Image: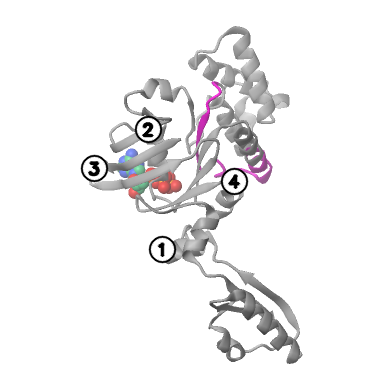
Amino acid sequence: MIHLEKIGKTYGSQQALRDVSLSIPPRTCYGLLGPNGAGKSTLMKILAGIVLDYSGAIDVDGQNFGKNLNAIQQRIGYIPQEISLEQTLSARDHLRFFGQIYGLRGSNLQKRVNSILEMVGLAERQKDALTTYSGGMKRRINIGAALLHQPDILIMDEPTVGVDPQSRNYIFDLIRQLKSQGTTILYSSHYMEEIQLLCDELALIDEGQVIESGTISGIRQRHTEPSIYVEARGLKKEQLQSYGAVHSRQSGYVIETGDALSAIQSLSANLQKQGLDVQRLEITQSSLEDIFLELTGSSLRDTA
Ligand SMILES: Nc1ncnc2c1ncn2[C@@H]1O[C@H](COP(=O)(O)OP(=O)(O)OP(=O)(O)O)[C@@H](O)[C@H]1O
């Protein structure tokens, strides 16, 4: 278990993190979801042992992070947002070079390099120079380099930025595989869909603060009442107002209602009686994006 207690960090007068407290359970994928500039990278750099001047306390499996930094760092693999590769080398030589930095030698080094090349799906291209690789392939090698020393904690800072769909799927499969092998993964993104797909728990971060945390279903339960979405040809807003507050959305309406189940039953019967052609009628819940907007007043992504 990783515990962060009131972590704060300033860059000059810029407060990048304030009072961030989180508990990251072992063998889970934990998401940090927030817009650009929220403080996700800073938090990850602190946990990777790169940013050292912060306030607050961290412990990893009961060990004080600051006092046991060298030992804990050996358990951590960190994949920065920026891809950093020695481009003139082949993928194999690049991994060998990084393996040596991690202290791997001889047959152990060969074995780890082979296994990583298989894991990231680039064994066939291992002899090609990295300059010939696509952005997604470079990202996969970058991830592989962080796995050479078999870390049980993996920190991934927006690993799918600039990545093609095929490589993105490789990365997602790799994350699932590592998690099933017991790795704890900290994953940052400003894409709600990725966090929903991969993460067991998450923290919503905005302006350096954790504004919510927990499981996706727990967060949804705390912040939204189920509502009804209905789409029917010729249906007017006024016909729905007896069920609750009605808002237009896409080609239909969302009805906020206290008891969605009984309301949907009664609405279904009513629409049928009126002979309306119903295209969609379902119970819905707010997305993480809606909740983020509700809590912060701003959106997760630039709307440009
Ligand atoms: N080295 C630095 N010097 C000064 N300010 C910094 C530095 N690094 C980050 N910041 C500032 O700290 C705040 C948090 O930045 P951070 O990179 O941690 O956010 P982020 O959520 O990871 O965003 P992004 O997705 O854009 O990387 C921002 O206001 C950023 O401008």
Picture coordinates of residue 207 (x, y %)? 35, 53
Between marks 2 and 3, how big is the CA–CA gap? 26 Å
First along the sequence among labels 2 and 3: 3
Work out how far the residue at label 1 is from the one at label 3, CA to CA, in angstroms.
28 Å
**Image depth: mark 1 or mark 2 in front:** 2
Instruction: Identify the residue position indicated by label 4 in the image.
Output: 198
Residue 238 vertical placement versus 60 (above, below): below
Which amino acid type corresponds to the residue marked 3 in the rendered image?
A: Gly
Check the image and name the residue furthest to the left. Answer: 13
**Is-magenta flag for residue 133?**
no
Residue at the spot 64% in from the left edge and 44% down from the top edge: 164
Q: Amino acid at mark 1?
A: Leu
Decide which of tag 4 and tag 2 comes sooner along the chain.
2
First in residue order: circle 1 vs circle 3 = 3
Type of the residue with mark 2: Asp
Q: Are marks 1 and 4 in contact (CB under 8 Å)?
A: no
Q: Point out the stretch of residues depicted in magenta.
A: 149-171
Image depth: mark 4 or mark 2 in front:
2
For residue 138, which quarter of the picture?
A: top right
Q: CA distance from mark 4 to mark 3?
A: 35 Å
Task: Return the residue at label 1.
Answer: 295
Q: Alpha-carbon distance for marks 4 and 2?
A: 24 Å
Residue drawn at x 56%, y 88% as measured from the top left = 241
| Residue beneath disc 3 | 12
**Circle on res. 214:** none
Q: Quadrant of ligand 1?
A: top left
Q: Residues within 10 Å of mark 4 (few under 14, many from 20)?
A: some
Given residues 281 and 130, the one toward you in this image is 281
Disc 2 marks which residue? 59
Check if mark 4's residue and mark 3's residue have beta carbons within 8 Å. no
Q: Position of residue 169 (x, y in %)?
A: 67, 42
Distance (Cα) linking label 1 and label 4: 23 Å
